[in-house]
Amino acid sequence: MPATRRSLLAGAAAAPLAGLLPMPAIAQNRPLRVGIIAPRAGVAGTVGEVGLRGVEFAVEKINAAGGVAGRRVELVIEEETSPRETTERARRLALQERVDVIQGIVSSGVSLALGPVLEESRILTVYWDGTTQDGVNETMPRSRWVFRSTDNECEAVMGSLMAIKHWRGQFVTVAGINPDYSYGRNNWAAFIAFLKRFNIEHRIVAEQWPRVGGMDLTANVAALKAANPDLVFSSMLFADLPVLMRQGHAAGLLEGRKWVFPAAGFQHTSLKREFTPAGMIFGHNTLYFADPQASPLAREFVEWYHAKTNDWPHWEADRAFFAMEVWRRGVEKAVQAKGASAWPSNAEIAEAMRGIKVVSLGGPGRMRRDGIAEQTFTQGPTVHDPRYDFPILDPAKITKLDGRGLQKPEGGDFWKWIAEAQFDI
Amino acid sequence: MSGGLRRALVALAVLAVLAAMPFALGEYRTTLLLPVFGYAIALLGINLLFGYGGLVSFGHAMFLAIGAYAAAVSGTVLRLASFEAALGLGVLAALAVAIPVGALCARYTKIFFGMLTLAFGMLFHSFLFRLYDITGGDQGLRVRRPTLLGFEFEDLDKTEFLIGPFYWYCLALAALLAWLMWRLVHSPFGLMLRAQRDNPRKAEYLGVEVARTRFIAFLVSAAYGAVGGAMLAVPTGLADPELAYWTHSGTLIFMTVLGGFAHFAGPLLGALTYVLLQDQLMTWTPYWRLVLGVVLALIVLGCPQGLMGLPALLRARFRPSATARPVPAE
């Protein structure tokens, strides 16, 4: 076959990356390189930093135990910014740094853009918190290289079930204050769908859509106060959530009504007791730092994190740990299947990751055959505890649910699933 | 050798070097040049307004977004795989928006022109962000891989497509549009544009229709922006509202100032330098924005003519008789 420009450009170096050829034996001596893409500034900057701590903890443990199938792991970190810039960073990791896998991504907008690029370029990727959903519909149902996190709506599904479980019959008028992007809109729609599904008599009295990262919510707070709802559902989760709580407290909005914050765990230590009343439903997603039933591994992580940062971790650390764990287990499974003859290709590793079960920091989870994660979620009503200057979950009322009960099945329609599935509340 | 011939030879040499880049650079560095071409085209348009017309637009990212969304709509909604169709649609859409916006903005100059363009840019961003059913809201619209001149290149994966046919296509388009812009700024229209920049009242006295000249420059600039936007969207595979956000407009101005708005090739150098600088800084430090800010401050203070003005600045430093004071684009 004559050499073409294409073959020259693609070359032997790109082939192992693409998973088309087994890596040469010499490559087995080098460390495995993991590319991490995480936000490090702006509205999701702290989220990225917590995720990076989860990665650091995971890699410390992996390397202390002898690496992945005998090979040490080293990290190459890039920043997640806009879709265009992040696509360039991902290409840099794959084409320049020659990483073996890319992990990370928090923003839905970025992960949606990146998914097809990574898939077309055959780059093995495990998202932390990124999705490939357009709204609630999957855009990459048969992805081969891109593995994504749980459905975005899991926490809203659980928050809705928790509201119904704890407060059925105690509210009629409901209001929503949700971030003005598809995540917020879908979560609010899911909550209303659950009220209908469980025949909860309700009346919507206000819908507020503040801009993500907006730091003045006085108009939204005033509108909610004027509507005087019995229950407010809010999937706000970034730095604007403590602002809502402060301004709501100052306006007397918070007291005397029920609140559901399915994603409050992202900001839990910023929601100080002096302006955050107890008795709200808080979602801690896939990691609750003070879980009385936490595994020894999770306790070790929380102590390690607290010693390093003097803060308490949230779920992004677990998502990062889970992504690393799924990949590690996939590599080891593929190596075992391949035998000592050669290192498995990325295609073989990707295949080995399908259906794999892992124990993450927040509890057991798995990577479904369709490349979508299922993890354990934690939510419950809050109490004030003198040991912390922010609300924690009432230890007697903590609920943990398996991800299988919180997201639509493979290939399923989200709204049809809500209407027809059996929910255990 | 005449100046024109020398310039043409230099341009051809640069073109030849750029055409050989996929063979000389690695895959990643070659993909980095794609946004350079997209931005270079958009900046040629912006500099027609800024450098030659004296009008600073803070909302021009709107036209890049229009080009990107046109590429998305062309491929996913209209099912037109052709990139030429996407470019045509982008230019038509940009002109449809630029005609009313330009008709209003061209009546103003200085801060009023800047603020008006900023307002329209943010209005358009809100439109993209809020109308979920039409624009995909915050998630934007997917841009599919287009065909080029009717060829699909289906045996190439995305990276191979980008660093091969798409690279040379974009380079050729950028060269063609740069040549057209060169002709434009050196035509009587270009003279009229510079005349109204330097002294609008005198230009009017001499028979220049000032508002009409600015309006035409605005339309050309919008069309260039749309072409650049469509070229940016293909490697990313997405048209998203952030393309129209005011910070992106600021980045465009930054690139123009960085390269030197007083020179025809300044914006091209600005685009190249910005993309490469940002790439390196993002690799070195999470505080890359801070460094970019410092670079901008240093350029404005120390080298107001941008990188293209650097040789003159150095000559002035070592030969006191030479001058390095800022001069408008000629």
Image (cartoon, coloured by chain):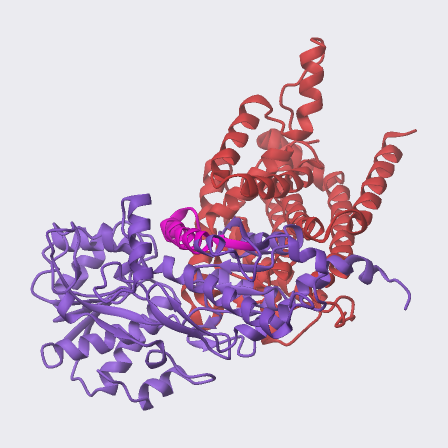
Is residue B75 inside the magenta stretch? no
x, y percent for residue A160: 24, 76
Number of numbered discs present?
0
In the rendered image of this protein, does residue A340 appear above or below residue A67? below
Which color has been applied to chain A in this rendered view? purple
Q: Residue furthest left?
A: A256
Depth check, front residue: A117 or A53: A53
Q: Which residues are magenta?
A: A34-60
- The answer, for residue B318, to whether it is visible in the render is yes
Is residue A56 inside the magenta stretch? yes
Depth check, front residue: B279 or A179: B279
Whether residue A8 sits left or right of residue A135 in the image: it is right
In the rendered image of this protein, does residue A217 appear above or below residue A206? above
x, y percent for residue B134: 48, 71
x, y percent for residue B50: 59, 38
Whether residue B38 sits left or right of residue A184 in the image: it is right
Is the magenta region chiefly helix, strand or loop?
helix
In the rendered image of this protein, does residue A171 appear above or below residue B213? below
**Any idea which chain is the red one in this picture?**
B
- The answer, for residue B87, to whether it is visible in the render is no
